[in-house]
Image: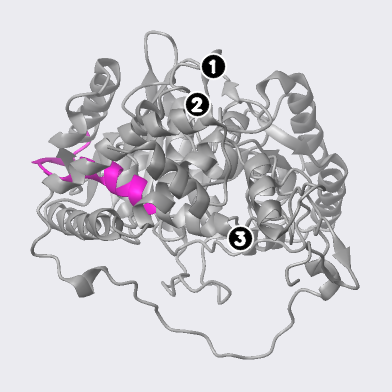
């Protein structure tokens, strides 16, 4: 039997009933990875590491130890998250030989829960992009049609989950990098509230916006993963002391009394008709299940994208200034002096999009432009937070499309950075306002490519999000 | 309008070097991005106070000595190392 198509909760049950072992699951996943090498969902596979872990867990199961739900489950990890002793490349030439000297806090959490990590996922270089075409190694195509992109920047993660190369993945989301690829590949992607999941040991892109989150097959699996990933970490200044919640207790099985906001700006110009109709169908579904639909407007919400490109590029330029090729990374051997060394290492190590963001970031931060761009963007951010606060007085969650279109063709947007940026127009406002949001598959378009809906909640309202998302997701599974 | 001079100046600040062709492309790319970013002007932010946009640090942890990376691990990935340290071209004449 092929177990790899099941959800985490389903195989966790089979593991406990001793109908399957972790080693069998891991071998099946490793076999799938070999069969689907053309998807380039992984930068590398750690077969020995995974099989040893699986055997260790099987031994514990055979001793009838009570283990966490994630025990023995093979998963993959985006390649910007440190696992001690393994490479962290960020899909960049610069870090192609970097071996992590320590593990991220979330990796320690996963290991404490006996998860079996089988490999690291391809991504856009340094998480900058929406299609994985910016990876220095290869593009991860869409598993539903390989002429199309998988989305990004966590494209390898989304593709891996959709193609059964692991039961879940952990990605990072700075402006939509978990949700947009999840939407394009037809899986569930969660961006938790800023501060809920520790970023210690994750390579920083834009520190005021970055947040790690799971990609899974179902909403319930997403809650299970968040239980493992979330929690205060003293190693991280922005880590939230929010009380540790049990997200598996989110599910009420109904949406009675829930107010779902429909913000008209998310349904305007630029939105593909098929995507729009799919989301409106979900709205009708919720209404039929007893939710109250509230029509709302947020006049400035889509300004978040311009705001995002100022703030994220400024922070990226600053974060990436530490990449000099002295402490780690690739280095040239013919530098004339220290400045020449920096210039050569950075120019040869970074790819085109990363350079573009560094340039844009240093431009908006440079003398004479700082007030007009950076400070203005911080003020607009404040206005957007106020707009969200106002709408959340009238509703519990917002229902929007995750991305304005389904997957686009490989190469279609690679020469037009602005059109690429626009594929994040509905996800970016969430990061700007530090909110949680989840993308859930809600059908396919006429080409057979997945459509995703996004539910946005108030800060730390993950339980509400999971409940509302699950009511739809469970009905979808029954079909 | 972004000019070639702007791009060359920012490249210098960014410690990046480009061919003339790349510079030309950057002028075009950055010009379209900055033009888009300029739409922020349409948002009235006159009621936002300067204090509202300052970065606020939450509680700082205590400054205590704890275990950290060993020297060996810290230089593990250095392309050039010497006597347990990072090696760079001569900086002081």
Left or right of A102 on screen, residue A129? left
Query: Residue A85 appears at what percent x and percent y?
Result: 81, 56
Residue A144: image tag:
1
Residue A224: % across, % down: 53, 51
Secondary structure under badge 2?
helix
Is residue B93 found left or right of A202 in the rendered image? right
Q: Which callout, 2 or 3, points to the residue nearer the camera?
A: 3
Q: Label 1 vs label 2: CA separation?
A: 7 Å
First reached walking from the N terminus: tag 1 or tag 2: 1
* Residue bearing mark 3: A322
Q: Chain of mark 2?
A: A
Can residue A183 be spotted in the picture?
yes
Question: What is the spatial separation of the Cα atoms under label 1 and label 3, in whole angstroms?
Answer: 39 Å
Q: Could you say which is closer to the camera, residue A346 or residue A268?
A: A346
Task: Give the crowd class for mark 3: few <14, some 14-19, many >=20 residues within 10 Å.
Answer: few
Chain ID at mark 1: A
Locate residue A59, reporting x and y percent.
86, 54
Mark 2 neighbour class, 10 Å CA radius: few under 14, some 14 to 19, many 20 or more: many
How crowded pointer 1 is (Cα within 10 Å; few <14, some 14-19, many 20+) is rated as many
Cα separation between marks 2 and 3: 34 Å
Q: Are marks 1 and 3 on the same chain?
A: yes
Tags 1 and 2 touching, CB below 8 Å: yes
Q: Can marks 2 and 3 be said to lie on one chain? A: yes
Q: Which numbered tag is attached to residue A248?
A: none
Q: Nearer the viewer, residue A22 or A16?
A: A22
Q: Which residue is mark 2?
A: A185
What residue occupies the far right of the structure in this picture? B83
Indicate the quadrant where residue A135 lies.
Answer: top right
Label 3 resides on the chain identified as A
Specify the segment rendered in magenta.
A289-312
């Amino acid at each position: 039997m092929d177990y790899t198509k099941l959800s985490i909760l389903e195989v966790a049950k089979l593991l406990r009933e001793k109908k399957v072992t972790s080693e069998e699951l891991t071998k099946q996943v490793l076999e799938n990875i070999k069969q689907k090498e053309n998807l380039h969902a992984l930068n590398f596979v750690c077969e020995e590491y995974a099989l040893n872990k699986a055997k260790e867990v099987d031994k514990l199961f055979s001793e009838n130890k009570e283990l966490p739900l994630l025990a023995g489950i093979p998963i993959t990890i985006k390649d910007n998250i440190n696992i001690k002793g393994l490479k962290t490349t960020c899909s960049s030439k610069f870090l192609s030989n970097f071996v992590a000297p320590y593990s991220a806090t979330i990796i320690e959490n996963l290991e404490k829960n006996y998860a079996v990590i089988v490999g690291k996922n391809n991504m856009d270089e340094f998480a900058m992009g929406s299609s994985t075409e910016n990876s220095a190694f290869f593009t991860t195509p869409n598993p539903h049609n390989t002429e199309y992109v998988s989305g990004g920047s966590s494209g390898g993660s989304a593709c891996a989950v959709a193609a059964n190369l692991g039961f879940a993945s952990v990605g990072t989301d700075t402006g939509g990098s978990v949700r947009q690829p999840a939407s394009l590949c037809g899986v569930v992607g969660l961006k938790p509230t800023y501060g809920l999941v520790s970023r210690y040991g994750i390579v920083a892109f834009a520190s005021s916006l970055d947040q790690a989150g799971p990609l899974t097959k179902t909403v319930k699996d997403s809650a299970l993963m968040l239980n493992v990933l979330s929690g205060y970490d003293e190693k991280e200044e922005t880590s939230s002391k929010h009380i540790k919640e049990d997200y598996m207790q989110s599910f009420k099985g109904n949406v009675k009394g829930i107010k779902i906001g429909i913000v008209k700006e998310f349904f305007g110009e630029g939105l593909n008709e098929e995507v729009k109709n799919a989301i409106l169908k979900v709205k009708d579904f919720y209404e039929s299940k007893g939710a109250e639909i509230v029509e709302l407007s947020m006049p400035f919400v889509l300004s978040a994208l311009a705001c995002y490109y100022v703030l994220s590029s400024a922070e990226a330029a600053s974060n990436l200034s530490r990449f000099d090729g002295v402490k780690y990374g690739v280095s040239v051997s013919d530098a004339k002096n220290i400045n020449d060394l920096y210039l050569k290492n950075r120019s040869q190590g970074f790819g085109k999009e990363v350079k573009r963001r560094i340039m844009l970031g240093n431009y908006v931060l440079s003398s004479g432009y700082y007030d007009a761009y950076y400070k203005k963007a911080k003020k607009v951010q404040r206005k957007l937070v106020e707009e969200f606060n106002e709408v959340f007085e009238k509703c519990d969650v917002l229902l929007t499309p995750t991305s304005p279109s389904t997957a686009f063709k490989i190469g279609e947007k690679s020469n037009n950075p602005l059109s690429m940026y626009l594929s994040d127009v509905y996800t970016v406002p969430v990061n700007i306002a530090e909110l949680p949001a989840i993308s859930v598959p809600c059908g396919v378009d006429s080409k057979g490519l997945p459509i995703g809906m996004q539910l946005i909640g108030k800060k730390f309202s993950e339980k509400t999000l999971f409940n509302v998302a699950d009511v739809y997701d469970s009905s979808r599974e029954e079909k | 309008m972004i000019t070639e001079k702007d791009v060359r100046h920012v490249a210098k600040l960014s410690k990046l070097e480009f061919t003339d062709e790349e510079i030309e492309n950057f002028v075009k790319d950055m010009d379209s991005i900055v033009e888009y970013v300029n739409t922020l002007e349409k948002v009235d932010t006159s009621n936002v106070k300067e204090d509202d946009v300052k970065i606020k640090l939450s509680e700082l942890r205590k400054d205590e000595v704890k275990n950290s990376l060993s020297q060996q691990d810290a230089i593990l990935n250095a392309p050039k190392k010497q006597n347990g340290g990072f090696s760079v071209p001569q900086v002081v004449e």
